[in-house]
Image: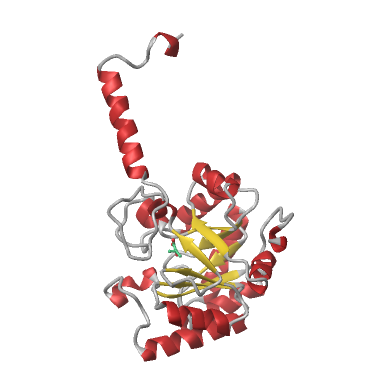
Amino acid sequence: MSVMKDVKRVTTHVLQEMKNNGVKIAMLTAYDYSLARLVDAAGVDAILVGDSASNVMAGHETTLPITLDQMIYHASSVVRGCKRALIVVDLPFGTYQGNSKGALNSAIRIMKESGAHAVKLEGGSEVLDSVERILTAGIPVMGHLGLTPQSIYKFGTYVVRAREQEEAERLKRDAKLLEQAGCFALVLEKIPAKLAAEVAASVQIPVIGIGAGSGVDGQVLVLHDMLGINHEFKPRFLRRYAELHDTISDAVGRYVSDVRRVDFPNAEEQY
Ligand code: KIV
């Protein structure tokens, strides 16, 4: 993979080169220093400080409650843990919709206060003003179409999006609009694989899928899901690469038992 040889820091330009050369992009979420450090050292190309932090870190039911200050806290922790990956941060709900000046201010705060490299926001034509305004400040923007969790109360369900022709056509138009506006990449979430492949072939910029099949330019997963920390969440698109729920439960259970039996600490584990 000559395009990745000697890449010390992945940039938006590197991601574009990867698409141009047919090298698939591997992206994962991270929200804290320790796991970001591991994920970065293990070789992912990009890290998303997703607003899924609202679910997996804070235990909210949706992504809506997380605030800009909280996203900046997570993002700056991730930045301190990473040397190589491109770091993209979600603009949280309410910080960019219907107010492009507010969107620019939110994006500037993220870049200035966290040290991340790009922002992501959800939606197409309805957020175009915000996308364009953020781009005028030289801040790279990643789009996000398909299942956009900040609109969950509009959708009413987390089922696959754009199965119907009308929504699929709108999604294709939005992908083109975001590309023309200057987005450096797009995320497509939970849409039919055939449609996602069509979109990836119709735009020049990298298209990264989650639940969008293999015909796109890269994949992203929520770290806690792929590590099996959250073992109740089992959507069809998720591949589990570890079962940390069991590993951690077992370790904590053994620790509790060792403390009770005064087996821990032993003679070597004290001063
Ligand atoms: O917030 C997030 O983790 C995301 C991914 C699911 C793409 O937006």
Is residue 48 visible in the rendered structure shown here?
Answer: no
Quarter of the rendering containing residue 253:
top left
Considering every residue shown, the one lying at the far right of the view is 6
- Give the left or right position of residue 260, taking residue 40 as reference: left
* Count of all numbered marks drawn on residues in the image: 0
Does residue 26 sit above or below 160 in this rendering? above
| Observer-nearest of 204 and 74 | 204
- Give the left or right position of residue 22, taking residue 263 as reference: right
- Give the left or right position of residue 7, taking residue 107 as reference: right
Considering every residue shown, the one lying at the far front of the view is 1
Q: Where is residue 264 in the image (x, y as percent from the top left)?
A: 34, 17
> Which quarter of the figure is the N terminus placed in?
bottom right
Q: Where is residue 100 in the image (x, y as percent from the top left)?
A: 53, 76
Q: Which residue is drawn at 60% across and 58% down?
A: 45
Q: Residue at x 32, y 52 (%)?
A: 59
Colour pattern of the rendering: secondary structure
Q: Which residue is drawn at 31% across and 59% down?
A: 234
Quarter of the rendering containing residue 249:
top left
Q: Where is residue 265 in the image (x, y as percent from the top left)?
A: 37, 15
Q: In which quarter of the image is ligand 1?
A: bottom left
- Give the left or right position of residue 87, taking residue 74 as reference: right
Is residue 15 visible in the rendered structure shown here?
Answer: yes
Q: Position of residue 95 (x, y in %)?
A: 47, 67
Quarter of the rendering containing residue 260:
top left
Does residue 245 sit above or below 60 in this rendering? above
| Observer-nearest of 1 and 171 | 1
